[in-house]
Amino acid sequence: MTVLLKADHVTKKFGGLTAVNRVDFEIEVGMIAGLIGPNGAGKTTFFNNITGLYTPTDGTIYFDGEPITGLKPHVIQKRGISRTFQNIRLFGQLSALENVLVGEHVRLHGSILEAFFRPKRVMTEEADAKEKALKILDFVGLGRKIAEQAARNLPYGSQRRLEIARALASDPSCSCSTSRRPG
Ligand SMILES: Nc1ncnc2c1ncn2[C@@H]1O[C@H](COP(=O)(O)OP(=O)(O)O)[C@@H](O)[C@H]1O
Ligand SMILES: [Mg+2]
């Protein structure tokens, strides 16, 4: 059994308030896990510690065997952790497809200069990215028909699905052996 995500005595204090108190757990590769608890129990604070929005006051978080405690959110995302938010945070004026492409951006390679001159390699990468985004829209049950609709015009449930699609588009890790990427 391989441990993908491990929390070791994770604590987060806001001044005198201890929001997360010495949490230990291990999530194995392929496992689907839920974290439940009443309002104010510290669930969101705990996720914010894992994804780098907060730095734990104490304790260590390991991902894929390496400590990620206190790393910046974009670095943690590159390591392979994606997330959605309790409050929907889509780019409302962008289309559903564009929102998913934003998620893929973290794995694309074109430079700013190439965005202007668009050599063939970049055009191919863009076409592949679009096809992949459409497949993800299918996967989350939204389908391709809504691809061009502005995110803000989608019903609430579809917006939640779109957030999951955007998170999946960054290729989060699901297995230690296949997930390791440079950066
Ligand atoms: N940024 C913050 N500053 C101060 N207190 C906070 C902050 N974020 C959360 N808290 C407090 O930490 C506790 C846990 O909150 P939270 O993690 O949002 O709980 P949950 O997501 O389980 O409902 C609550 O008492 C909340 O008021
Ligand atoms: Mg919460």
Image (cartoon, rainbow, N blue to C red):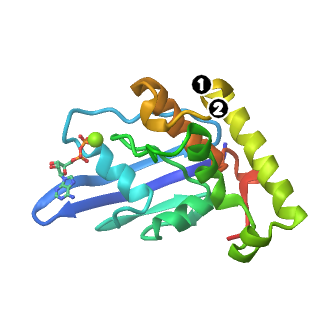
**Residue 67 in sight here:** no
Q: Quadrant of residue 41?
A: top left
Residue neighbourhood size for the residue with mark 1, other residues' Cα within 10 Å, grouped as few (<14), some (14–19), many (≥20): many
Q: Which residue is mark 1?
A: 142
Vertical relation: 171 (above or below) 54? above
Image quadrant containing the N terminus = top right
Q: Residue at x 50, y 39 (%)?
A: 163
Q: Residue at x 56, y 38 (%)?
A: 96
Q: Disc 2, disc 1: CB below 8 Å?
A: yes
- Residue at the outermost left position: 16
Vertical relation: 138 (above or below) 183? above
Badge 2 element = helix
Q: Which residue is mark 2?
A: 137
Q: Is residue 128 left or right of residue 27?
A: right
Regarding ligand 2, which quadrant of the image does it lie in?
top left
Q: Is residue 132 left or right of residue 39?
A: right
Badge 1 element = loop
Residue neighbourhood size for the residue with mark 2, other residues' Cα within 10 Å, grouped as few (<14), some (14–19), many (≥20): many
Q: Residue at x 25, y 46 (%)?
A: 42
Q: Position of residue 31 (x, y in %)?
A: 59, 35
Q: Earlier in the sequence, mark 2 or mark 1?
A: 2
Vertical relation: 45 (above or below) 161? below
- Does mark 2's beta carbon lie closer than 8 Å to ligand 2? no
**Residue 13 in sight here:** yes
Q: Position of residue 149 (x, y in %)?
A: 55, 33
Viewer-nearest residue: 39 or 28: 39
Q: Position of residue 123 (x, y in %)?
A: 83, 58
Q: Amino acid at mark 2?
A: Leu
- Residue at the outermost right position: 120
Q: Residue at x 59, y 53 (%)?
A: 102
Q: Amino acid at mark 1?
A: Leu
Q: CA distance from mark 2 to mark 1?
A: 5 Å
